[in-house]
């Protein structure tokens, strides 16, 4: 990850963007309470982010330069690993800014300084596309309030709006330790504990909005070998292009390689159509309860086109798709561009 261009700002009020025809205003809302995540007890194994020290140990020597390892420059506790997310979103923000001509603000439900920002008109009024990154551990008890659900419902009544929402993986929901261990061996990421359940805020928001999708599991995608000396790549998506009337996946063949991605299960019939636009093949070399049940792929992108009183689109896709922590390529950036343009 490279240094961001231009001066950096923090801890200031958002300046609303003026509507410009043909140029979408994109905002990101992170559902976590930063203090609740950063202050988790590191002696508790489950349901927390790694400390930066753990990241350095597991991924050694990738983060051994002073930029990451010097405690005078970078935080070494859980807060350090949270800051890696912000580093990894810089490229997404920059590309969307180039496409739209507008900056991309990143809001947090509770930020580093303890300022609380509910998902309300202060976030929604000057947005055309809203990304909701569902990265709160459920133990931190982040729940969408009725007034927040109503605010997003009103946002989606506006013509041309789009909600992109993605609660992260749900690892280790079973009380059976053998099943948890099977999941852990399947994804193979030493930084993910035997239980790591995400998405309390996004789940309650989706239920309140009548979005019949639920994040399940943490599945390792299949990979394809690169040329000699190049790293493995995530296997291509299986895209239902006949259903993709808006062209969300035009020119897109794959997302980024991440070791534990959620299956977005469609849970019931909705009042309007729910399209699974893309599925991701699963690594079958390691057992998992989901593959033991006969599944060979998981739902990676779900689309609900406008319907009824909802004039806006809803897309369900994981937040890791907008991060460069796990690499990026032309296909991934084409997906970002498609969303920035509104399909």
Image (cartoon, helix red, strand yellow):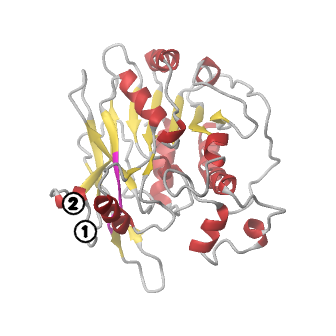
Q: Quadrant of residue 293?
A: bottom left
Q: Which residue is mark 2?
A: 291
Q: Which mark is residue 304?
A: none
Please determine whether, in this image, residue 223 is positioned above or below residue 47.
Answer: below
Judging from the image, what secondary structure is the residue with disc 2 in? helix
Is 97 placed left or right of 160 in the picture? right
Residue 100's spot in the image, x, y percent? 60, 37
Task: Check disc 1: other Cα within 10 Å, few if <14, some if 14-19, many if 20+.
Answer: some
Residue at position x 77%, y 28% in the image: 13
Of the pair 93 and 193, the residue shown nearer to us: 193
Query: Does residue 221 belong to the magenta stretch?
Result: yes
Q: Is the C terminus in the top left, top right, bottom left or bottom right quadrant?
A: top left
Judging from the image, what secondary structure is the residue with disc 1 in? loop
CA gap, disc 2 and disc 1: 7 Å
Q: Quadrant of residue 140?
A: top right
Please determine whether, in this image, residue 201 is positioned above or below residue 259.
Answer: above
Q: Residue furthest bottom?
A: 228
Residue 232's spot in the image, x, y percent? 42, 74
Labels 2 & 1 near each other (Cβ < 8 A): yes
Of the pair 180 and 80, the residue shown nearer to us: 180
Residue 276's spot in the image, x, y percent? 27, 42
Residue at position x 52%, y 44% in the image: 135
Query: Does residue 121 belong to the magenta stretch?
Result: no
What segment is highlighted magenta in the picture?
A: 216-222
Residue 169's spot in the image, x, y percent? 41, 49
Q: Which residue is mark 1?
A: 284
Of the pair 2 and 141, the residue shown nearer to us: 141
Q: Quadrant of residue 286?
A: bottom left
Q: Is residue 149 visible?
A: yes
Please determine whether, in this image, residue 197 is positioned above or below residue 131.
Answer: below
Task: Check disc 2: other Cα within 10 Å, few if <14, some if 14-19, many if 20+.
Answer: some
């Amino acid at each position: 990850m490279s240094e961001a261009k231009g001066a950096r700002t923090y801890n200031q009020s958002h300046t609303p963007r003026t509507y410009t025809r043909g140029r979408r205003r994109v905002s990101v809302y992170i559902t976590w309470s930063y203090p609740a995540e950063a202050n988790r007890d590191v002696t508790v194994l489950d349901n927390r982010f790694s400390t930066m020290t753990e990241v350095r140990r597991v991924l050694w020597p990738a983060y051994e330069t002073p930029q990451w390892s010097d405690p005078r420059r970078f935080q070494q506790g859980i807060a350090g690993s949270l800051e890696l997310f912000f580093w990894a979103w810089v490229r997404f923000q920059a590309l969307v800014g180039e496409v739209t001509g507008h900056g991309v603000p990143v809001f947090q439900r509770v930020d580093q300084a303890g300022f609380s920002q509910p998902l309300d008109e202060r976030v929604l009024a000057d947005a055309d596309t809203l990304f909701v990154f569902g990265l709160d551990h459920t133990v931190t008890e982040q729940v969408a309030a009725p007034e927040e659900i109503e605010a997003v419902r009103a946002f989606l009544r506006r013509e041309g709006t789009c909600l992109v929402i993605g609660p992260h993986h749900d690892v280790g929901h079973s009380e059976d330790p053998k099943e948890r261990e099977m999941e852990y061996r399947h994804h193979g990421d030493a930084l993910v504990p035997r239980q790591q359940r995400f998405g309390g805020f996004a789940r309650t928001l989706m239920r309140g909005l009548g979005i019949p999708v639920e994040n399940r599991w943490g599945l390792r995608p299949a990979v394809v070998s690169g040329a000699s000396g190049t790293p493995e790549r995530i296997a291509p998506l299986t895209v239902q292009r006949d259903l993709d009337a808006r062209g969300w996946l035009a020119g897109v063949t794959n997302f980024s390689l991440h070791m534990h991605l959620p299956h977005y299960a469609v849970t019931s019939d909705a009042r309007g159509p729910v399209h699974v636009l893309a599925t991701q093949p699963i690594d079958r070399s390691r057992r998992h309860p989901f593959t033991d049940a006969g599944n060979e792929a998981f739902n990676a992108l779900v689309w609900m086109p406008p319907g009824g009183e909802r004039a806006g689109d809803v897309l369900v896709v994981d937040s890791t798709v907008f991060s460069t922590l796990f690499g990026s390529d032309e296909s991934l950036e084409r997906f970002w561009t498609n969303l920035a343009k509104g399909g």
